[in-house]
């Protein structure tokens, strides 16, 4: 009987610890979101650009109603973090919901540019990307370190409307789509 009570006590304590960790994580995420909403993101100037893995002229700052800013640093597996096939689906989806009103800005700080260009060639991402070798975007804006929060939905003035990476959490994409729909119908 004492063994059963001891096992129940250990299981209960593990569950309580797990629940409190999840609550702590949720509270931390909510705090991070509140901190970033309405904040202006400053975009570094004079970064080199690539299109389909070739050098290109960087475009002027976007004046579209919405921008989705995707920042990927050199930590971890670049292809795992990017999920370019899903981004291509999201780009098509955004264009069908809010035609011509959503721009996607990809900023990469690769540890291995050759690997990144190979990935871009293989995945055929038909978007201009910014090569942020010195991590200027992260430095000037003090971006969160967690990859889940290095993606932002911005308005035309680069103010944060929402934060979160929809390739890591598809519910974020639903939030972004609602914001496109609400804002374009106003």
Image: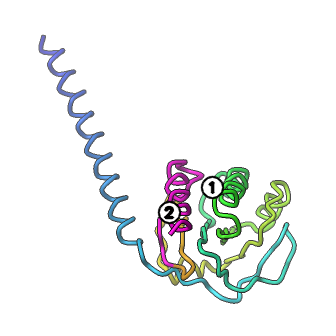
Q: Callout 1: helix, strand or loop?
A: helix
Q: Residue at x 55, y 60 (%)?
A: 181
Q: Is 22 in front, or is 128? A: 128
Query: Which range of residues does the magenta coloring cover?
Result: 159-186
Q: Quadrant of the N terminus?
A: top left
Residue occupying the far top of the picture: 1
Colouring mode (rainbow / by chain / secondary structure / one colour): rainbow
Q: Residue at x 54, y 75 (%)?
A: 155
When the figure is inspected, residue 142 is found, relative to residue 118, above or below; the finding is below
Is residue 84 left or right of 169 when viewed as pictured?
Answer: right
In the image, residue 9 lies at what x, y percent?
17, 26
Q: Is residue 180 magenta?
A: yes
- Mark 1 is surrounded, within 10 Å at the Cα level, by few (under 14), some (14 to 19) or many (20 or more) other residues, namely some
Is residue 186 left or right of 12 when viewed as pictured?
Answer: right
Q: Quadrant of residue 59?
A: bottom right
Q: Which residue is identified by label 1?
A: 81
When the figure is inspected, residue 54 is found, relative to residue 84, above or below; the finding is below
Q: Residue at x 21, y 29 (%)?
A: 12
When the figure is inspected, residue 158 is found, relative to residue 151, above or below; the finding is below
Q: Quadrant of residue 4?
A: top left
Is residue 31 left or right of 173 when viewed as pictured?
Answer: left
Q: Is tag 1's residue or tag 2's residue first in the polypeptide sequence? A: 1
Q: Which residue is identified by label 2?
A: 182
When the figure is inspected, residue 39 is found, relative to residue 164, above or below; the finding is below
């Amino acid at each position: 009987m004492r063994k059963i009570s001891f096992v129940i006590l250990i299981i209960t304590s593990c569950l309580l610890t797990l629940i409190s960790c999840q609550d702590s994580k949720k509270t931390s995420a909510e705090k991070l979101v509140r901190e970033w909403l309405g904040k202006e993101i400053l975009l570094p100037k004079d970064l080199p650009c690539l299109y389909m893995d070739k050098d290109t002229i960087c475009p002027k700052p976007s004046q579209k109603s919405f921008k989705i800013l995707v920042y990927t640093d050199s930590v971890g597996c670049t292809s795992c973090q990017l999920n370019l096939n899903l981004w291509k689906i999201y780009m098509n989806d955004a264009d069908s919901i809010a035609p011509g009103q959503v721009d996607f800005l990809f900023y990469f700080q690769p540890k291995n540019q050759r690997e990144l260009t190979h990935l871009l060639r293989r995945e055929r991402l038909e978007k201009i990307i910014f090569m942020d070798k010195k991590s200027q975007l992260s430095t000037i804006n003090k971006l969160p370190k967690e990859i889940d929060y290095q993606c932002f939905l911005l308005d035309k003035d680069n103010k944060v409307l929402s934060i979160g990476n929809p390739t890591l959490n598809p519910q974020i994409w639903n939030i972004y789509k609602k914001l496109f729909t609400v804002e374009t119908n106003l």
